[in-house]
Amino acid sequence: MNRLLLTDELVLLAYDDAGTNRLGRPHLDYGLAGAVLLELALAGRVEVTGGRLRVADPAPTGVPLLDQALATVGGDRPRKPKDWIGRLAKGLPDRVLDGLVDAGVLRRESERVLWVFPRTRYPSPTGAEPAVETAARERLRAALAADGPVDARTAALLTLTRAVGLDRKLFRELPRDRVKGRLAEISAGDWASAATKKAIEETQAAVLVATTAATTAAIAATTVS
């Protein structure tokens, strides 16, 4: 397939080798919505001014997933990034997974648990980790293990893994203090324009708020029940 989007990489990193979502729902959904906004920010299509997400350039990117989101944002009044996370998240996991299946990166396996409950898994066709996933994983680990600047897309993907809590699963072999310090260093680095960095920081915060709220609600529901 062509160059992977941040949405593709996040899905591949979130699913284990058995094809099961390690993040759960709606954390992956919110993370993917954040990934879409980060792609648009990196492409110079959206920016955050006055705390509101606005379209800076309405020109299509040529990627249907991104262009639909761009049209949605542009067709409404400026809103805070956190207001867009839930709106853009609907249906995103299925669309991204369908694209990876169509490209032959993953395969779809539908089954029933205890002959009653339907379950769909998305392992790789070979049973081994897809090469594109390995490349993304190694890129992130190299950025954390090294010193100095990183490219904008790697920095953006790292902010996503941190916002959805995936960093704790991906980088267990690295010292936790090192990961925490390096992520803070990368966030403060000069790897994108001020406008792009602002949009990415606001999006990361919005995803973190959404996932935290979902976790809190789930705990509360469990406690009540």
Image (cartoon, rainbow, N blue to C red):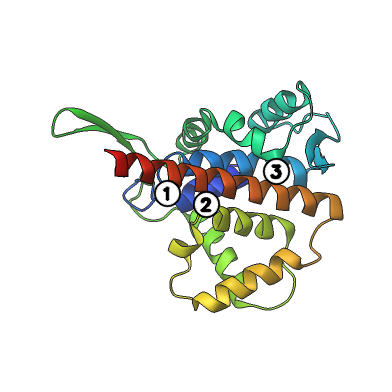
- Give residue 198's position: percent from left, percent from top: 79, 51
In percent of the image, x 66 and y 34: which residue is there? 83
Residue 66 placement: quadrant: top right
- Give residue 23's position: percent from left, percent from top: 42, 49
Residue nearer the viewer, 154 or 166: 166
With respect to residue 187, does 65 lie above or below? above
Residue nearer the viewer, 180 or 36: 180
With respect to residue 9, does 56 lie above or below? above
Of callouts 3 and 1, the N-terminal one: 1
What numbered label is drawn on residue 144?
A: none
- The residue where tag 2 is placed is 164
Q: In which quarter of the image is the C terminus?
A: top left
- The residue where tag 3 is placed is 39
In percent of the image, x 60 and y 38: which residue is there? 33
Would residue 36 appear left or right of 121 to someone viewing this image?
Answer: right
Of callouts 3 and 2, the N-terminal one: 3
In percent of the image, x 49 and y 79: which residue is there? 175
Does dot 3 land on a helix, a strand or a loop?
A: helix
Q: In which quarter of the image is the N terminus?
A: top right
- Give residue 47's position: percent from left, percent from top: 81, 41
Q: Residue placed farthest to the front in the image? A: 224
Question: Are discs 2 and 1 less than 8 Å apart at CB?
Answer: yes
In percent of the image, x 61 and y 31: which residue is there? 88
- The residue where tag 1 is placed is 23
Is there any visible trace of residue 151 in the rendered image? Answer: yes
User: What separation in Å lies between label 2 and label 1 (alpha carbons)?
Assistant: 8 Å
User: What separation in Å lies between label 3 and label 1 (alpha carbons)?
Assistant: 21 Å
Does dot 2 land on a helix, a strand or a loop?
A: loop
Looking at the picture, which amino acid does disc 3 mark?
Glu
Looking at the picture, which amino acid does disc 2 mark?
Val
Residue nearer the viewer, 149 or 103: 149
Looking at the picture, which amino acid does disc 1 mark?
Leu
